[in-house]
Image (cartoon, rainbow, N blue to C red):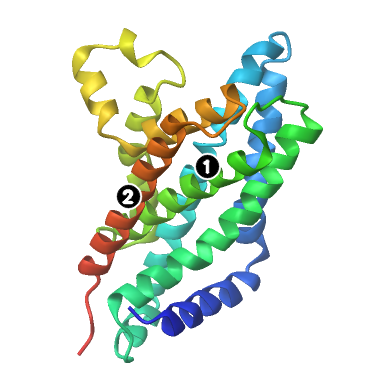
Amino acid sequence: MNIKKVYFTALRVLQQLSHDPRTLALVLLMPAILLTILKFVFEKSPSTFDSIAPMSLGIFPIIMMFVITSISTVRERTIGTLDRLMTYPISKLDFIFGYALAFSILALVQASIASFVILVLLNVSVAGGTVSLLIAAVIAALLGTSLGLFMSAFATTEFQAVQFMPAIILPQLLTCGLFVARDQMAQGLQWFANIMPLTYSVDAMKQVTNHNTWTHTLSKDLIIVACYAVILLILGAITIKRQE
């Protein structure tokens, strides 16, 4: 993997996104908007919102980045951009990690906006502080990017890319422990949740919410999520077909 090529690939993606203000607005503002809506959903139960909101920050970035990344990659394949890039002296890892870098930068901005909304505008108390919240949110968004890049290899149209979201994300969302404690679920669902990355993203946010110091459990959860992201990026690179 060539760092310079990764950088220029990320720069190209960011320049391309800069010409699509609607996509930028969707990526950067939608998590904050969803969190605000959630605030009013639990208007009569503010304590419930205070406990759910930080954990939602470990979910919304994954969903948004999954959708945007998978659609963007499929679009580049359908219009021929991906095929042309693969004829250049650039490795598959350079391409994949360049995309990951570009969307991780977007994720940092997205997480900063969402964290500002949660901590300042919605006045939610997070024991771990802003830095821990940002790190956990960015790693969650990186996971969403990795999932999107990997699953885009199995979609031939942008519509198919969107169809993967309920199949990949929703089962994890239902079993991650956000709605019901995992130890109250059926044994099979507990096993499923224990091997899914979204579970550890939500657990990391729980640690950030409830502990005012960086805990060993938080490190473990973030490392697991990051490892999933890296593995998916490598698998995504393997599934890319190079044009000769």
Mark toward the start of the polypeptide (2 vs 1): 1
Residue 182 position in % (x across, y down) = 34, 16
Check disc 1 and report the residue beneath it: 136
Front residue (pair 7, 214) = 214
Q: Residues within 10 Å of mark 1 (few under 14, many from 20)?
A: many
| Label 2 secondary element | helix
Name above or below for residue 197 compared with residue 67. Answer: above
* Among the 4 quarters of the image, the one containing residue 180: top left
Name above or below for residue 230 compared with residue 223. Answer: below
* Among the 4 quarters of the image, the one containing residue 198: top left
The kind of residue tagged 2 is: Cys
Q: Judge whether residue 222 can be spotted in this image.
A: yes
Residue 75 position in % (x across, y down) = 42, 68
In screen coordinates, is 134 left or right of 93? right
The kind of residue tagged 1 is: Ala
Check disc 2 and report the residue beneath it: 227
Q: Residues within 10 Å of mark 2 (few under 14, many from 20)?
A: some
Residue 192 position in % (x across, y down) = 23, 27
| Label 1 secondary element | helix
Q: Identify the residue shown where x is 44% and y is 72%.
A: 98
Q: Identify the residue shown where x is 49% and y is 78%.
A: 7
Q: How many marks?
A: 2
Q: Spatial distance from mark 2 to mark 1, Cα to Cα?
A: 14 Å
Q: Identify the residue shown where x is 41% and y is 49%.
A: 143
In screen coordinates, is 210 left or right of 29? left
